[in-house]
Image (cartoon, grey):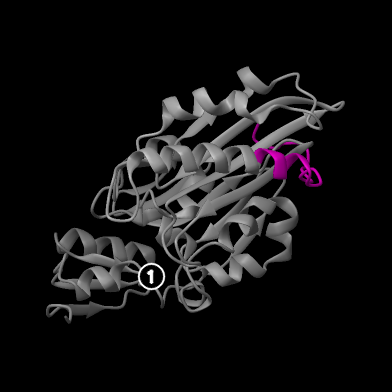
């Protein structure tokens, strides 16, 4: 199928874009288009106006500070994947991004667009959640910041107002001594994951002091599971990772579909979590400066 008819709008600033959204109640924002265009082509959405952010200057920048990695709305997945500064500050970004679809999609799709799409089967929403990230939104009435935990309202639903645009997201940096890993399982590489997990484990003096996980495809919205209560004090070289199974299972909300049953997704998520934790503690610790977010 082909998209329904629409009018193409090319604002020169975010303020202009927000004004266009306010003027047209059914308008949609176009960035990379890798989520939106298929939806339009299947006519699951039929907006009368598309507001293209591509001509707005300054939205394709990556900024690394002691506290966060800031990613603008037009930064492509491939650009962030290749950015050595972002990788050095937050290896989890690259660990997750290599699992996003295929190179052709990563070359066009934007990291912020993936987050704003709010698909629980996407990798980057889970990374924003586990890093205690922040969404920077702009609307006709000004700017506001939305914590990741308050941003995702439901499947494909956020707390953004219709006339607000995500200008950038900030991924928080981890404390020194934190190791991370990302694992997912899909029927074919590049397909949506049947289940996936991002983990962050902080190790001090050869003992685990904190551990967190965030999941893909097995929860309604991205959220964080604190595993510290069952892992704190463990020796990472000899830890029994299965102790997290009950805590993880209590957080999961998988659904059955044509690809896998809910029971299989639960089992898969638990196994991926155990493997990711083992992989994380084998990694070098994250380089993080004073002022990291936790």
- Residue drawn at (81%, 46%) of the image: 284
- Residue drawn at (29%, 60%) of the image: 18
In the picture, which quadrant includes the N terminus? bottom left
Question: Residue 49's quadrant in the figure?
Answer: bottom left
Toward the right, the furthest residue is 205
Q: Is residue 127 left or right of residue 210?
A: left
- Can you say whether 79 is above or below 170 in the image? below
Judge by depth and name the residue closer to the eye, 142 or 2.
2
- Can you say whether 43 is above or below 239 in the image? below
- Residue drawn at (51%, 30%) of the image: 225
Can residue 132 be seen here?
no
Q: Is residue 238 left or right of residue 109?
A: right
- On the image, the x and y values in percent for residue 182 come to 60, 49
Judge by depth and name the residue closer to the eye, 113 or 267.
267
Dominant secondary-structure state across the stretch colored magenta: loop
Assign a secondary structure to mark 1. Answer: loop
- Can you say whether 210 is above or below 63 in the image? above
- Can you say whether 187 is above or below 160 in the image? below
In the picture, which quadrant includes the C terminus? top right
- On the image, the x and y values in percent for residue 249 come to 45, 29
Question: Residue 42's quadrant in the figure?
Answer: bottom left
- On the image, the x and y values in percent for residue 199 come to 61, 40
Q: Which residue is mark 1?
A: 31
The magenta-colored residue range is 277-294
Judge by depth and name the residue closer to the eye, 113 or 242.
242
Can residue 80 be seen here?
yes
> Number of numbered discs present?
1
The answer to whether residue 222 is magenta is: no
């Amino acid at each position: 199928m082909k998209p329904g008819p629409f009018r193409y709008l090319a604002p020169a600033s975010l303020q202009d874009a927000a004004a266009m959204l306010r003027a047209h109640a059914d308008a949609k924002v176009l960035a990379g288009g890798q989520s939106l265009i298929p939806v339009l082509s299947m006519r699951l959405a039929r907006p009368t106006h598309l507001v293209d952010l591509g001509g707005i200057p300054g939205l394709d920048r990556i900024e690394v500070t002691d506290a966060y990695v800031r990613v603008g709305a037009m930064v492509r997945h491939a650009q962030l994947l290749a950015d050595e500064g972002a990788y050095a500050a937050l290896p989890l970004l690259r660990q997750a991004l290599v699992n996003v679809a295929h190179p052709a999609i990563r070359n066009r799709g934007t990291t912020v667009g993936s987050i704003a799409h709010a698909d629980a089967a996407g990798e980057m929403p889970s990374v924003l959640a586990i890093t205690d990230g922040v969404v920077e939104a702009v609307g006709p009435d000004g700017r506001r910041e939305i914590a990741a935990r308050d941003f995702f309202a439901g499947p494909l639903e956020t707390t953004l107002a219709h006339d607000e645009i995500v200008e950038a997201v900030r991924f928080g940096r981890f404390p020194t001594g934190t190791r991370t890993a990302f694992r997912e399982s899909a029927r074919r590489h590049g397909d949506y994951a049947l289940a996936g997990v991002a983990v962050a484990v902080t190790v001090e003096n050869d003992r685990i002091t904190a551990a967190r996980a965030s999941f893909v495809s097995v929860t309604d919205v991205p959220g964080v599971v604190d595993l510290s209560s069952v892992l704190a004090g463990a020796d990472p070289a000899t830890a029994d990772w299965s102790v997290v199974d009950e805590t993880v299972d209590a957080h999961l909300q998988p659904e059955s579909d044509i690809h896998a049953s809910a029971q299989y997704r639960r089992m898969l998520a638990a196994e991926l979590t155990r493997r990711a934790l083992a992989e994380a503690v084998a990694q070098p610790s994250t380089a993080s400066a004073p002022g990291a977010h936790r």
